[in-house]
Image (tube, helix red, strand yellow):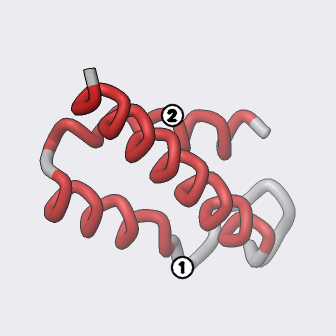
Amino acid sequence: MRRVLTWVGKVLLLAVVYYVVASGSLSIASLPGNVSAVWPPTGLAVVALLRGGRRLWPAVFVGALVANAA
């Protein structure tokens, strides 16, 4: 049970951090509604998945989904 709670905590933390970084990156886009030339959330996702394993992919998915929907 403790292992599951730890995993859920990591997923929620990564999703929130991804959302914050993605929102900041979208705010520096050259034109509103366009993609940013620099996308730091990709680096965050790669590092998180390399260090934490594939079990953290739901966090990246949720963070990206919420950031793009907002």
Pick the residue in front: 52 or 39: 52
Residue at which label 1 appears: 38
Q: Which numbered tag is attached to residue 62?
A: 2
Compared with 14, 55 (above or below) is above
Give residue 53's position: percent from left, percent from top. 13, 49
Q: In which quarter of the image is the N terminus?
A: top left
Residue at image position (26%, 63%) is 46
Give residue 21's position: percent from left, percent from top. 61, 66
Amino acid type indicated by mark 2: Val
Residue at image position (51%, 50%) is 13
The local secondary structure at tag 2 comes to helix
Residue 57 quadrant: top left
- The answer to whether any part of residue 7 appears in the image is yes
Give residue 34's position: percent from left, percent from top. 72, 60
Compared with 65, 38 (above or below) is below
Amino acid type indicated by mark 1: Val
Residue 63 quadrant: top right
